[in-house]
Image: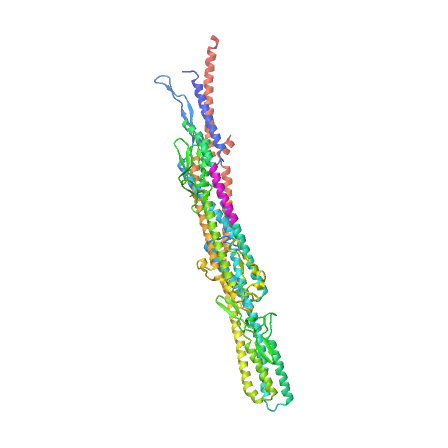
Amino acid sequence: MSSFLGIELGLRALRAFQIGMEVTGHNVANVNTPGYTRRRVRFANTPEFAFSPQVRLGTGVMAQSIQRLRDMMLEQRLNTNSGDLARWSALSESLHAIEGLFNEPSDTGVSARLNALFNAFEELATRPDSLAARQQVLQSARALTETLRSLHRNLTTLEDQLQSRMVSTIEQANQLAQQVARLNEPIRSAYSSGGESGDLLDQRDRLVAQLSELVGARTHYNDDGSVRLFVDGQTLVQDGAAFALSTQIDLANRALDSTPTDIHISSGQLRGLMDSVAQLQRYRADLNTFANALITQVNALHSTGFGLDNNTGYLFFSGTDASNIDLHADVSDPDHIAASAVSGVPGNNGIAQALADLRNAPQASLGGQSLTQYYRTLIGGIGSDAQVSRNRAESQQLTVEHLYTLRESVSGVSLDEEAANLVRFQRGYQAAAKVVSTFDSLLQDLLQFVAPRA
Amino acid sequence: MRISTEWQFRQMERAIGHGTDRLSLWQRRVTTGRRVEQPSDDPVGTVHALALRQQLAQLEQYGRNIREAKLFLQATEQAFTDIGEVIGQTRQIVTQGANDTLTPEARDALIQQVRHLKQRLHQLGNQRPDGKRYLFSGQTLHTPPFDIAGGVMTYNGDGNPLYVPIAPERNLPMNFSGARIADLYNKLTEIENHLLSADSHTLSDTDLRDIEQFQAEFQRYRGEVGVRLRELHDYEVLHTQRKDQLTDNLANIEEIDLTEAISQLRQAELSYQSALQVFTRIQSMNLFDFLRGGG
């Protein structure tokens, strides 16, 4: 037995408590780092020393390992649910934006413009010969066509934005997948040497969480510490390799073109964006159906009537849908508006009345709904879609919050706890230092005692 | 359960965030008075509100149409009153002319009066109160309805109704054909001729009977104008009531109940304040602070 055993024992304790304080410091420093997992030092007593078979001496303490406190099951559930949250949030955001574009109910939306046009037709029916009534018709029709065109244009701009966000989401996911693949190797080698690199794991888990949010990636943790990522059962990351997702989007199937089979996206921001674009396209198609019915019906009536110049065959609208609906050049002269059903009879309001009656007339091309009804139904549909997606996002948010609470309860840093640990290690350190100095003074005494001989 | 510091802050952040959201929502609602700002706030309500707005817009248009028809019918009523006066005066002339003892001077005076009345009738028939549309030409509108050629008046209008939409499924004809005015004029010419020929027998017999028939007929027309004006008035009242009702319904959907909104705003303010207070308390509660204080 070495006479320095006591000092050695004290030193070990000092070293262990120092590590404890450093880990505490690391935890405190990362209290605000997102995705940081708190660490805890596991202390163990060092192997005892058999002074004699009856006397076995303890040799002190060592920091056996630094544990990273994380519940992987919880982590996976959190990721899955974050992916769904990202999906519904993305859809909800887009639908909110679409709602904003439709701008209903208001005095400047399509609905109000349409009412104004039908009112103008009705006014024209009352005064079929009046120039003022005719100008009113033209003005309200122009306002309606401009509103429809700008709505169509804005929808298309939003669609372009969503489309490019889909592509950038995929590209971002591909980059993240590469980073995960690069991290797999060092993590595995740290594992095989019996330890784990907390910072690398934190970094990887953050990337994995982001991938879940972006494309709804699923995870499988291997025994060697590395992770495998999947999307729709197809491998995204395995060992050191990442397989890039295609940016060729098959919107109808909510899938990405891939061989041998397409990859269906069922979660994450990407799915939300896909749903957004699909919904937007449907609304726009409905808007076009509406505009087309308006153009067709108004023109069919108008072209049979007579203008104040007694000519017939004038068209009222030009264009085929909401993108290009406009006033027809035929009616650039207000006298060409065909209010009368009879040639040379300016007081006849047959056509004006028929145009006004279009307001509530069922249209076969709109599934038996009138123009106004069809448009209202479209707005109602957008509203309830937006409401449903918002509710889904809100309830998903609660689920994620709940899981986050559980995760934080395992992995989050508590400053109170760290403060207590700091005090504990500090006191331990102070006590160990005392032990070292006590043994030191013992040795000092001993040395003084033997010194004269030397 | 372990509470981590980050989680604690996040909870507070969320509570404060919720607080601000709710506060600004009710602030906005109280200031704008609107409950539905976008369809998703109430999809069913929005569809209903759009339908109500459409009905309101249509009612307003009916209101304008009714005012237009009223003006036209009031002018027509005045015209029939004036024509009624012409007929009344003619009747007196006919009664006077039927007297065999009439002096030639008196007869001449009567003839002058009849000629004057004919002119007056022509003017009344061809009047356009708004400077554009003839009252009696029917749908031909801009063509003077009455022409006189060789002393005979012809009606050039088509006599067709000018329909005005005044309610769903109700188009009111606001005009009257002028065809009978021409007949009346030509009757006056006959009377003039009978006065000229001193045919007191025809005057007292056929002419008097005819003119009395005209009198009754044009009174009927005036009555008919009254009926239409009353219908317009009834619809106007009905539309106003309906508009009030619809506006009320619309307000129920689109607008907030101010009392409720203000109390909601108070609550939102309170919970926001308490969230802030809790935050400042929690912030100061940390073991590190106590350790430092103790050291």
In terms of secondary structure, what is the magenta stretch mainly?
Answer: helix
Can you name the residue that lies furthest to the top here?
Answer: A453
Instruction: Please determine whether, in this image, residue B57 is positioned above or below residue A435.
Output: below
B187 and B31: which is toward the camera: B187
Q: Is residue B4 visible?
A: no
Indicate the quadrant where residue B176 lies. Answer: bottom right
Instruction: Please determine whether, in this image, residue A302 is positioned above or below residue A79.
Output: below
A253 and B212: which is toward the camera: A253
Instruction: Please determine whether, in this image, residue B211 is positioned above or below residue A284.
Output: below
The total number of labels drawn is 0
The x and y percentages for residue A40 are 43, 30
Q: Is residue B76 left or right of residue A250?
A: right
B27 and A58: which is toward the camera: B27
Give the residues drawn in magenta, as a range: A156-175
The x and y percentages for residue A22 are 48, 28
Q: Is residue A261 visible?
A: yes
Q: Is residue B138 left or right of residue B45?
A: right
Can you name the residue that lies furthest to the bottom here?
Answer: B101
The x and y percentages for residue B260 are 49, 54
The x and y percentages for residue A268 are 45, 42
**Per the image, is A131 magenta?**
no
Quarter containing the N terminus of chain A: top left
**Per the image, is A159 magenta?**
yes
